[in-house]
Image: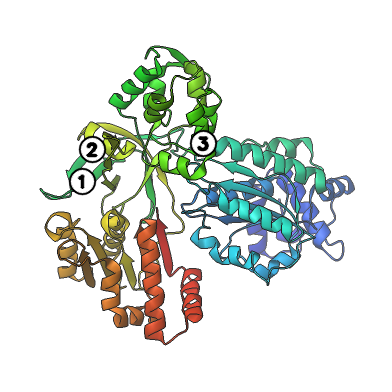
Amino acid sequence: MLEVINSPFNEKQVKQLNEVLATLTPQQKIWLTGYLTASANIGVIEAPREMTQQAVASSPIQKHVTILYASQSGNAQKLAEKFGDQLQQIGLEVSVSSMSDYKTNALKKAQYLLIVASTHGEGEPPDNAIAFHSFLHGKRAPKLDHVQYAVLALGDSSYEYFCQTGKDFDIQLEKLGAKRLVDRVDCDVDYAEQAEKWFGEVKEKLHSEFTQFTPSEQEAAATVLQEETEYSRKNPFVAEIIEKINLNGQGSNKETIHLELSLENSGIAFEPGDCLAIIPINNQTLVNSLISALGFEASTKVDVDGTSVTLEEALLKTFEITLLTKPLMNKIAEYTENKDFHALIENQETLKQFMNGRDLLDVVEQFGPFNWDAQGFINCLRKIPARQYSISSSLLAYPEEAHVTIGVVRYEVDGRERLGVCSTYVADQLEVGDQVQVYVQKNPNFKLVDDDTPIIMIGPGTGVAPFRAFVQEREERGASGENWLFFGDQHFVTDFLYQREWLNWLKSGVLTKLDVAFSRDQEEKVYVQHKMLKHAKELYAWLEKGAAVYVCGDKNMAKDVQETLLRIIQQEGNKSEEDAMEYLEELRKQKRYQRDVY
């Protein structure tokens, strides 16, 4: 143990060093010794020669790994941070950063670059990657011959431009002269296993590049991404439903469910802006019809991840059957010689039109029979993804509860009613007292600013959900920042979601301003962006005094709102189109323009 009398440190430093040293593993002490020895200009620390040599050999002091993430919902960020932690544990010098926070000049000195990128909307980069993506594809991008890189792309194969952002980065880095460490991997919604394999290959490559690890360090650097003890897709929390209300009035052509779930004794924590993921069960009638059309028996046994279950159970609880994707159609093509089916998948535009709104039952009925058995059929399918909903409550206001606001999806194609998997599971199959499997999905890119900052919230329809949580949180914290909500829907009488709560907050002063747009209550449709333009001068004044803008809703609305914001900034700020775009981008960098878009 260090003491003042046997060291060059003062009493305070000795106390701090002893506290830290007591927590270190032998490998961490070795690494620290090597680091201090290699970074000192003279031999200040006299370590045993064999220990110093071992530490220097296992510590890549002169090498650096940069991990950048492009993340909208938080998945890419979570993976990037986990990768960074594991690389640091084996003694590598690592920095992990959002693309929006990364200084592009640093690329000139980058050595090893790992990119974890999700794709947003129709092949677009997430909000926190827009500027970096533009820079890398612009004239100012530097030559990167000195960089070795690897890209992990996250996406959803149900979208046409699957993993497009990751593909963009991979191709552009190569064009700029960078060299691949390993090939890019494109992950679907169930990404854990593929991400784990990719990272294992990256770590092995880095190892061979510049580091020799001791056996104990190799053990600490196991490539398996340890399953966290927190609740997740593989380890959901079973929550009891304590309230279920249809928020729409009689006569509305919409159905919006307000669902309250008990999180009692779960230890689950979340912040306003986070999402609750619900693991749904497929519709029993659809499953029965699909099994019948396939000509299989419901009781037929199939293997799912090494476990034998009935075909009926697998289709009810494990696999996606309501969404057609291009990868799925290509797999199905291997089991048929039907000329019409092959012609369909070879014509991209026709295939896109066919897949829109249809499901597996349509394929089986129109193009069957197929030469597969039950196991072969199951092997074509991907796991049913959990559905994420913005949490519409604050833990401060409702401890050990989570509320969500779910728009129920029902539509008709080819004379058959189609049902949104999770929304109708909640609406038609669950009641108060029933249980549902859930877990929290963090959303670090949609977070409340400090209590003093004014906020402008734009959320038509179910997009208003996170803003209910925002206002509850600010009320409970006694926040001084002003709050302005823009809300829109079809009809005032039947579709004003949480009307009583908003009006009560307006009366009490918690909500400073409320502007609503009901599109079908007059001959000419009125949307939230029209209300924004009506209050353009005041809205711009709020921006100038430091307000943050939040947008939540579908991609079409978000695009219209952004165009309106740019128009207001141009008009009221007397700016050019280019200057307005720079103004909005600066808001984004300052976390004063945040979007949750689906």
Q: Residue drawn 87% across and 61% down? A: 43
Q: Residue drawn 14% across and 60% down? A: 492
572 left or right of 88? left
Residue under label 2, please give it.
427
Q: Which mark is residue 345?
A: 3
Residue under label 1, please give it.
255
Residue 510 visible here: no
Q: Residue drawn 30% across and 29% down? A: 283
Q: CA distance from mark 1 to mark 3?
A: 35 Å
Give the image location of residue 297, x and y in percent. Answer: 38, 12
Give the image location of residue 239, x and y in percent. Answer: 31, 36
Of circles 1 and 3, the one toward us is 3
SS under mark 3: helix
Query: Closer to the N terminus: mark 1 or mark 3?
Result: 1
Amino acid at circle 1:
Glu
Query: Closer to the N terminus: mark 1 or mark 2?
Result: 1
- Would you say the residues marked 1 and 2 are in contact, meaning their CB atoms lie under 8 Å apart? yes
- Would you say the residues marked 1 and 3 are in contact, meaning their CB atoms lie under 8 Å apart? no
